[in-house]
Amino acid sequence: MGRDLEAILFEIQKGKGPSLLLVHGDSFQVHAASKAILDILVAPEKRAFNSERFDGRSTPWDQIEAALMTPPFFPGRKAVFVDDAPYFLSREHKEELGDKVLQLWDEGKRDEAARFFLELLLLEGWTQERWERFQGPLSEGQTAELFGAEGREAKEVVAELMEFCRTSRMELRQRGGEGHRLMELLEHGLPPWGFLLITASQVDRRTRLYRRFDESGAVLDLGLERDRAGRISRETLAEFLDRHLKEAGKRIEPQAREAILLRAGDELWAVHQELEKLLLYVGEDPWVRVKDVEEVFLDQGEGWVFDLAKAIGERDSLCALGHLARLLSHGDHPLKLLGTIASEVRRLLAARQLIEGELRQKWSGAMTYRQFQMIVLRQGPPLVARSPYGDYMSFKTAENFTTEELLGCLEWIHQADIRLKSTASPPRMVMERLVLEMCRGPAQRKRQNEN
């Protein structure tokens, strides 16, 4: 069963608990937990001799096991730390891993995206020999096989990714039975001096190895609670914020607290970074005020992008223009926003075509989400979005448009793309015009044409 960090730290201090531990989940919390565990295991003055750290993606298992079996130089425990281990992935994990690759590449995290991409190829059965022979790029079918439905749209991105891997001389390192040998360590135990700490960016809880770790009480799951849109839940962010401010001895105005929650992004380490910057700015002042947040705290809330798409879907022009102004004022590139809007329109068009076609007799705009699952999805895979709830919301929003209107939206998006790339038109004016065109209903268009 899963453990919590405080209990594990207490057991380690008392010399009890497991000597082999897997930590996974949010990267910021995993890093903080690993540091706390290592600080208890090995004193700083002994760390150079009584601890060893390995990159789980590139270090052969024989080297890790040899370190475990070698006694420490000084008396006490010896900590072997394997960071970012891929031992808990499976082929069923492929779709999630593919999404992660594209997300990291989009965020500019090239090295990390490349490492996960090679891991994806390994799960697909690629070898180093095949990687060296293959001159690429991947075909549309091969890309779709790796990345699912997103693959066809991601073909150009994957071509860039492969070129980056080759230029960086990255290799596919076959894994040689680490799972089996880890299972043996769980069964037979480590030497009395040994402690093996493993962190993982991604895990598949369905694998036999992960289940065995969990049953042994050797798993620390630091995953964050997220909402239906995949964002960190408000409650989790609020708890993190309140704890951080309490540790710093600061009080916060209600409006300032709300402003931080609105501006917080989808990565806890980035929220932590902004909070540290805010506390430095406040200095000796015991209060954090809303003006401090507005001055210092970077708006990382990707939710504003989705809120813009949602407002357009609801044809609420005032709300949509407000979100657009906020995003542009915080440095979001118009082409990035245009891409998000285009993706949303394509989803709505797919949903609209299903409503008017094969699902005509099944779908009703008055359906609840539960009814939608039982009648439309029938426990099948998502139809147009990445989740059943995403499908439901896409169908609901598609009711606000006709197929002809959505096709018209794609044409307006195309024209906006041309204006942004090849004319001197002010980007903000181009985007505002697009938003207004998309939000206008048939009655408004008819009145304008009559005038």
Image (cartoon, helix red, strand yellow):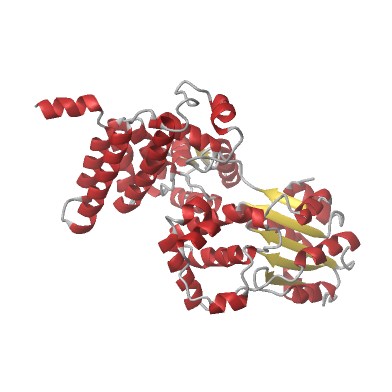
Q: How many labels sit on residues?
A: 0
In the shown orientation, is residue 281 left or right of residue 30? left
Task: Kindly indicate the quadrant of the structure image that contains residue 74.
Answer: bottom right
Task: Kindly indicate the quadrant of the structure image that contains residue 245.
Answer: top right
The percent coordinates of residue 58 (x first, y second) are 65, 73
The percent coordinates of residue 320 (x first, y second) are 31, 36
Which of the pair 400/24 is nearer the observer? 400
From the viewer's perspective, is residue 171 above or below residue 380?
below
In the shown orientation, is residue 432 left or right of residue 373? left
The percent coordinates of residue 293 (x first, y second) are 42, 43
Residue 119 visible in the shown view: yes
Q: Which residue is drawn at 70% across and 49% down?
A: 221
Q: Which residue is drawn at 58% across and 45% down?
A: 244
Q: In which quarter of the image is the N terminus?
A: top right
Which of the pair 370/101 is nearer the observer? 370
Which of the pair 301/78 is nearer the observer? 301
Residue 39 visible in the shown view: no
The percent coordinates of residue 344 (x first, y second) are 39, 42
Q: In which quarter of the image is the C terminus?
A: top left
Which of the pair 47/183 is nearer the observer? 183
Task: Kindly indicate the quadrant of the structure image that contains residue 351.
Answer: top left
Q: Residue at x 76, y 67 (%)?
A: 178
Residue, far left: 451
